[in-house]
Image (cartoon, rainbow, N blue to C red):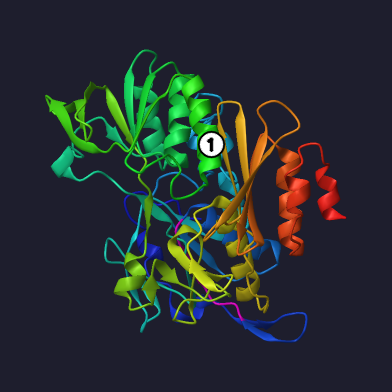
Amino acid sequence: MTLAGAGVTPEAEVHPPHSRGLDRHNNNGVRIVTGRLVIVGAGQAGFALAAKLRALGDSRPITIVGAEESLPYQRPPLTKKYLLGEMSFDRLLFRPEHWYADNNVEIRLSTWVEQIDRAAKQIVMQDGSRLDYETLALATGSTPRRLPPSVGGALEGVYVARDKRDADLLADEMRPGRRVLIIGGGYIGLEAAAVARHRGLEVTLIEMSDRILQRVAAKETADIFRSIHQKHDVVIREKTGLKQLVGRNGHVAAAELSDGATIDIDFVVVGIGVAPNDRLAKEAGLEVGNGIVVDSFARTSDPSIFAMGDCVELPWDGARIRLESVQNAVDQADAAAEIIAGGDQAYDPKPWFWSDQYDVKLQIAGFNLGYDETLLRPGAREGAASVWYFKQGRFIAVDAVNDAKAYVTGKKLLESGVNPSKAILSDPAADLKQLLA
């Protein structure tokens, strides 16, 4: 295993053609290629692909290239339990260091890919070295959108929340009594607000849309979470954008808002969405839309190159979408591993998501894209509720707030393709089990 620092080890710069591996046959006698697989990206999808291939008994040479200095790790707990000091970083690692050597997975850290040479079937590293591949997998993830310098985005004290470095910087800032401005009322912003309040900060959250969660959830779900945050003394200002951050000695000190107000702040967390990391694919001439375009087998427009996770645009329910979730990254990587190992099963996404804020757990089954009707159902216990989404009369998703029964029921209904009875859903006294009869 190579744990490279600023670059790669000289003896591993180029793998000669014969080191790409050999051919073999699967259990059905089908010839499959076992040449070198290079995975660009050491996040959830990249690790899941390598781990699944080894679980399938696939022994082809695998190299993972990652820009961070850390071994692959879970990201969701970074801005929750890790930031709160409730979980050490080593507990976030998918596997300890010896796993990679034990499983013949070479991992190159603190290095990145500058170019894909499709004609030569090589990737070009930032130091100019090259690495041969027989199969290439792009698991490059996404990058948080940042504020432009024109509104103060280059000032010190302006952060995004994506990786370990971001979490460590935020941990130093989040001290009781300090004032934070959170820009963006999506799940990232709301989760940041919850952590900041837990650590005793004064929190103001602004959202330029009409309401929080405008792009991702129904008004009913937004109303629930607005109320939760207001009960925890978060100041939420909707229909309010940022006009300008004001600096003092190079560090952010205040924010001028679009409603004319100016507030004093100590730092800023920006949660205004992410952009797919598709530069490599685009420059290599692969088809790119809202991310790297793949088919239902995770293949790009080049049959030797696969892509998965946050960076891809994939087919789903007659449309093309990009799913930003850990679940999709893992499931799509697992499906791609099966294909690479000689399988022929298409990936059929079954979206689900979650968000933890304070003592509230939001579980989402399905994808509410294009919904035209919602139904709010109170839960069996205080504070529990669910929002059911329909599109042209068809059930497509459910948001379950501290309501595991609603989530599990909704998920089963979606998997079976059964439309729930709206009469039962509208009756708080009705048992949801009736929907599965």
Q: Viewer-proximal residue, 24 or 178?
A: 178
Q: Secondary structure at mark 1?
A: helix
Residue at x 77%, y 63% (from the top left corner): 416
Tell me where residue 125 appears, x and y as whole percent. 32, 64
Q: Is residue 18 above or below residue 184?
A: below
Q: Is residue 60 above or below residue 156?
A: below
Quadrant (top left/top right/bottom left/bottom right) for the C terminus: bottom right
Tell which of 404 and 269 is nearer to you: 404
- In this view, 136 is above or below 259: below
In the image, residue 359 lies at what x, y percent? Answer: 60, 26
Magenta span has 37? Answer: yes
Res 140 quadrant in image: bottom left
Q: Is residue 185 above or below residue 352?
A: above
In x, y percent, where is residue 406?
A: 73, 43
Q: Neighbour class for label 1 at 10 Å: few (<14), some, many (≥20)?
A: some
Amino acid type at image mark 1:
Pro
Residue 294 visible in the displayed image: yes
Q: Which one is nearer the viewer's eye here, 76 or 246?
A: 246
Instruction: Residue at 37%, 60% (x, y): give it.
Output: 277
Image coords of residue 23 (percent x, y): 62, 83
In this rendering, does residue 89 appear at all? no
The residue under the point 40% across, 26% down is 171
Taking the view exactly as shown, the residue that stands out farthest to the right is 437
Residue at image mark 1: 77
In the picture provided, is 20 more to the left or to the right than 24? left
Residue at the top extreme?
177
Query: For the magenta stretch, what is the residue range?
Result: 33-41
Seen from the viewer's position, the closer of residues 406 and 324 is 406
Across the whole image, how many numbered discs are drawn on residues? 1
